[in-house]
Image (cartoon, rainbow, N blue to C red):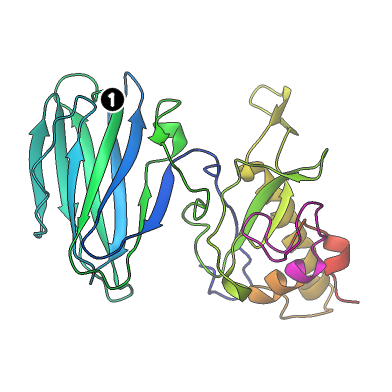
Amino acid sequence: MANLGRTSICVGAGNEGNAAGHTAGRLESYETKEIELGVQSRQTAMNIQIWKTYADQVRISLITPSGVRSDPIQEVRGTQRMRIGSTEILVYYGEPSPHSLSQEIFIDLLPAETYIAPGVWTILLETGRVVDGRYQMWLPSEAALNPGTGFLLPSEEDTFTIPSTASRVITVGAYDALTFTYADFSGRGGQGEGYRIKPDLAAPGVGIMTRVPGGAVTAVTGTSFATPFVTGGAALLMEWGIIKQNDPYLYGEKIKAYLRKGARQLPGFDRYPNNQVGYGALCVEESIPY
């Protein structure tokens, strides 16, 4: 949709920045690495997505909070099923796609009775020959998990959520307009450089006053409430360009470029763009080319 003419699609970066739902690292050949995952009580179900380079040889096992270790997960096509104590485990090994050299290993934890065994689970990575070594792991959205369930050594990088990962949308992070500080829940991109960095810019997303069903006014927080500011800004640019005939081609990547250029820097950052607020805070006035 973002590739179509006369569109400008704005998407919130998500609220997973401080949710402990992501971890990452780098593996060496013929080593063993333990990734610890805390599961709170009364967790009904959850899954783990592991991504690695397809060429790397990595054998995966799970260790329950009581110390029971699973057999190594076999790298075979299709779904595998096993059971450790009171938890059933479904595993799917992916393969590279026409658009990616990466491989996904999807692990689904399901309670054989009511809840997944609470405590610290360990994901054991045992490597063979490693070429690249980079890996990343994600849990479901924080909203789908009990408070406190997450990786014990999380990474805040690469926590922006689909579809804000799409390159041609305008990805919007959040900041607190009272303190002009980055909102730590706001999803971050990776440590990329140049035009591919995400988010593209930030807008107020903390304590935003809005109406709720019934007509009452309340304060809300999240990148979903930062995004409408940027959507409105994009609409104003399109009105100036297309409706008022100042620039009939003011849409798509051109709007993003203008908004990036007009963004105002926030205190506390010495490098722009960055993976927290992108090119800075939304400023429509400075984004209109005069």
Residue at numbered disc 1: 44
Q: Nearer the viewer, residue 204 or 7?
A: 204
| Residue occupying image coordinates x 50% and y 61% | 165
| Residue occupying image coordinates x 72% and y 66% | 272
Q: Nearer the viewer, residue 287 or 249?
A: 287
Residue positioned most to the right: 290
How packed mark 1 is, by other alpha carbons closer than 10 Å (few <14, some 14-19, many 20 or more), is some
Indicate the quadrant where residue 224 lies: top right
| Residue occupying image coordinates x 66% and y 21% | 214
Q: Main secondary structure of the magenta part?
A: loop
Residue 264 lies in the magenta-colored region: yes
Indicate the quadrant where residue 215 lies: top right
Position of 217 compared to 3: left or right?
right
In the picture, the quarter occupied by the C terminus is: bottom right
Above or below, 254 against 83 in this view is below
Indicate the quadrant where residue 177 lies: top right
| Residue occupying image coordinates x 31% and y 50% | 49
Q: Nearer the viewer, residue 238 or 51?
A: 51
Estimate the x, y position of residue 218 in percent, counting from the top left. 72, 25
Estimate the x, y position of residue 186 in percent, counting from the top left. 61, 45
Under mark 1, the amino acid is Thr
Secondary structure type for disc 1: loop
Position of 283 compared to 205: left or right?
right
Residue 144 lies in the magenta-colored region: no
Estimate the x, y position of residue 203 in percent, counting from the top left. 73, 50
The boundaries of the magenta stretch are 259-279
